[in-house]
Image (cartoon, rainbow, N blue to C red):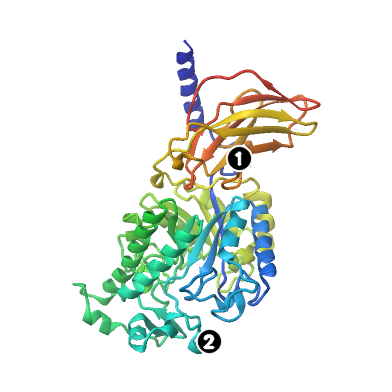
Amino acid sequence: MKAIISFFVFLLCIVFQSNAQPVNDQPPVEMRGAWIATVGNIDWPSEPGLSPDRQRMQFDSILDVLKAMNMNAVFVQVRPAGDAFYNSNTIPWSKYLTGTQGTAPEPLYDPMEYMIKAAHDRRMEFHAWLNPYRATFDLDTAALSPLHPLRALPDESKAEWFFRYGRRYYFNPASAKVRQYLVNVVKDIVIRYDIDGIHFDDYFYPYKENGQELDDYNDFAKNPRKFNTIEDWRRDNVNRLIQEVSQNIKKIKPYVRFGIGPFGVWRNKDRDPVNGSDTRAGITCYDDLYADVLLWLKNSWIDYVAPQIYWSIGFPPADYAVLVDWWSKNTNGKQLYIGHAAYKIGNSGNDPNWNQPTEISKQLALNRANQHVQGSLYFSAMSLINNPLGVQDSLITNEYRSQALQPGMSYLSNVTPATPQICKVKGTESTIKIAWNVCNILKGDEMPFYYAVYRFSGERIGDLKDPRNLVYISPYNDEKWIFEDRTAVEGEYYTYIVTGFNRVNVQGEISVPVYVKKTKSGARKKRKVWGYLFRA
């Protein structure tokens, strides 16, 4: 009889959860990230040469503001131009960190190691953002570290590895040696650091400049690899890097996500009537940067795409609404985050819509109306923190007033996180405390990476899709599995459940609920437990 009742409750819970709709407008699951740019000291550090204490203080301040905005991820530029914001034997320290390329912080510390811990302590994902092909930010090679390959390699190797275009030097995508070098750069980061993702931005082949032409025709002639056009050959050069980076990441740490933040227009319709978007962009991913992002999505070489749709809703050459719709139809089942131009707010240029304080709010409403959009990234962090036209205030008060879980990637998850058990309930005059543990761990991958605690009024399990019921998300790998509820009201009954998540944010089964009454002096657990198990 008990088994029949349990199964009946299980079915009711499944039906209830599948039909439940949020009772407010806040998505319970949503990527909310910010790009933190280091090139040119755009976001962090504020200037080169600051003491490590000042650098750490500034980074903590940025995270604290983003956390107060209910952001849940940062994408930090750790390789802006052939250099590093981390301790490496093969990559020189960045001049944007210390003032001189190759000079270490004094006293020595590892910025990326610190930043990862700072983010994880705030339960924010850390994605290492690399610019793979940009070798320098100017032509002053004398200022490069002797460790930089543009200085270290013999002249004949430099001719294969690099080319000059405009005011910069670039790693040559056609070189197999360059490709292996860049793959090794990524492998080193993945092996040594507890990152959540590797992220490339929109810079592949360089953006076109007037009067400049790529000088790679000899490379094409020497080894065309059966391609009839240099354009297809260039795209294949980039494809090979993306594929190899992806494969190596997954061999080392399958949970580390690999994503791209491409230019917002893949192709215009006039160049590709079948697959192109109804736009008139002067530059496109496919035709100008030689980045075939759709192929990468189709082949599962990347786990998400975050197109930089840096135009407003209704902007004629590249309408934000048109592009969100286009990208949402072309992700091949991978996750889609939209890149927003926070830096344009109040700085309209040729697009006056950016002078309207509601532009970002309208964009978020459009995103949330599209079931294929899983969240947003903002360029860049300081643009939000500086609060132009009150955007930070608006996000805190309206769009992001509740915390959100990161979207799970079930296609990267082979094991379901183990189910936690609430093992202790205590209370004080002002709080209810619950503690939980995890039993029956069969494999290491089953150990949850973090936990969520839900609280419902009364003796019932309510809507897990309503973010108001999500009262706590633990830090990553936290050793204290305790939640202290400071908002419980004396005389009221509450239901608590806990659920675990793995490294790719896949949720496990919920715990057996506990029913607790807040008393004047503490808390009293009601001995009422239904035996059932269902997925949240």
Q: Secondary structure at mark 1?
A: helix
Residue at left offset 65%, top offset 37%: 482
The kind of residue tagged 1 is Pro
- The answer to whether residue 386 is left or right of residue 227 is right
- State if disc 2 and disc 1 touch (CB < 8 Å): no
Residue 220 disc label = none
**Dot 2, crowdedness within 10 Å: few (<14), some or many (≥20)?**
few
Residue at image x 68%, y 57%? Answer: 64
Query: Which element type, helix, strand or loop, lies under badge 2?
Result: helix
Q: Amino acid at mark 2?
A: Ala
Q: How many marks?
A: 2
137 to 359, vertically: above or below:
below
- Residue 457, horizontal then vertical, whole percent: 67, 28
Residue 43 horizontal/vertical position (percent): 61, 69
Q: Nearer the viewer, residue 233 or 341?
A: 233
> How far across and down, in percent of the image, does residue 11 sit?
46, 23
Residue 298: which quarter of the image? bottom left
Label 2, on which residue?
A: 143
Q: Is residue 227 above or below residue 25?
A: below
443 left or right, relative to 108: left
CA distance separating discs 1 and 2: 51 Å
Q: What residue did someone put label 1 on?
A: 467
The residue under the point 47% across, 27% down is 15
Neighbours of disc 1 within 10 Å: few (<14), some (14-19), many (20+): many
